[in-house]
């Protein structure tokens, strides 16, 4: 299973265009979008390349590949213009081929969320972990900062944050790749 994971585009059309190029190069089975896709939100400055209508068009062009969750900036109007579901607080994917790092057995759950309802408490994500099986991963956005590490409070749970496509708070526009049971960051 190969996933491309992105979060916090915030209507930044130029960086979304770079993300679309990465999707073409990486050729993932699915594209996981972890929320805050179109609107910049009241706590962020407008991205220099803010053009949500262009972002809508780009994301709708890959709608058949997208699995998305709601960020804290999504609204009902976003669902009206996007051709894929984007209003769930969480979703779960199961990779039957991955080796579970906690048990050594086959299969790994990936809990997908934005980080404002469910999260590992890293940076400014909420500290509210769902009950997950040992070896699972929580995959979240919201903080605009990259993470690829075990949870300190839940050492059998892996935490992955791809960073932000549009408004990074750690200095680099980025996304993530999940392949062969491992997470990696990629820059734009």
Image: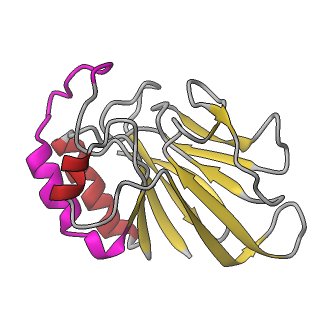
Front-lying residue, 174 or 65 = 65
Figure quadrant of residue 60: bottom left
Front-lying residue, 34 or 47 = 34
Quarter in which the C terminus is drawn: top left
- Vertical comparison of 87 with 181: above or below: above
At 17% from the left and 57% from the top, the residue drawn is 80
Left or right: 108 in relation to 188: right
Quarter in which the N terminus is drawn: bottom right
In reply to whether residue 50 is colored magenta, the answer given is: yes
- Vertical comparison of 1 with 78: above or below: below
Figure quadrant of residue 36: top left
Residue 76 in the image: state x and y as whole percent.
24, 48
Left or right: 123 in relation to 86: right
Residue furthest out toward the right: 103
Left or right: 51 in relation to 178: left
At 64% from the left and 73% from the top, the residue drawn is 94
In the image, which residues are magenta? 42-66
- Vertical comparison of 20 with 50: above or below: below
Figure quadrant of residue 159: top right
At 76% from the left and 52% from the top, the residue drawn is 131
**Type of colouring:** secondary structure
Q: How many marks?
A: 0
In reply to whether residue 132 is colored magenta, the answer given is: no
Residue 137 in the image: state x and y as whole percent.
69, 55
Left or right: 171 in relation to 10: right
Residue 122 in the image: state x and y as whole percent.
64, 29
């Amino acid at each position: 299973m190969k996933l491309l994971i992105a979060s916090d585009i915030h209507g930044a059309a130029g960086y979304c265009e770079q993300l679309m190029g990465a999707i073409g190069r990486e050729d993932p089975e699915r594209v996981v979008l972890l929320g805050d896709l179109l609107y910049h939100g009241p706590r962020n400055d407008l991205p220099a390349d803010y053009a949500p209508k262009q972002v809508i068009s780009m994301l709708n062009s890959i709608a058949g590949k997208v699995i998305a969750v709601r960020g804290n900036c999504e609204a009902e109007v976003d669902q009206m213009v996007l051709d894929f579901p984007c209003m769930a607080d969480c979703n779960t994917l199961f990779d039957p081929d991955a080796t579970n790092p906690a048990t050594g057995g086959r299969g790994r759950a990936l809990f997908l969320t934005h980080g404002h309802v469910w999260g590992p408490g890293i940076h400014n994500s909420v500290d509210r972990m769902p009950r997950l099986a040992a070896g699972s991963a929580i995959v979240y956005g919201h903080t605009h900062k990259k993470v690829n590490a075990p949870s300190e409070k839940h050492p059998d749970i892996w935490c992955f944050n791809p960073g932000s496509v549009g408004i990074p708070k750690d200095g680099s526009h980025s996304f993530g790749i999940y392949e062969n049971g491992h997470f990696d960051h990629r820059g734009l």
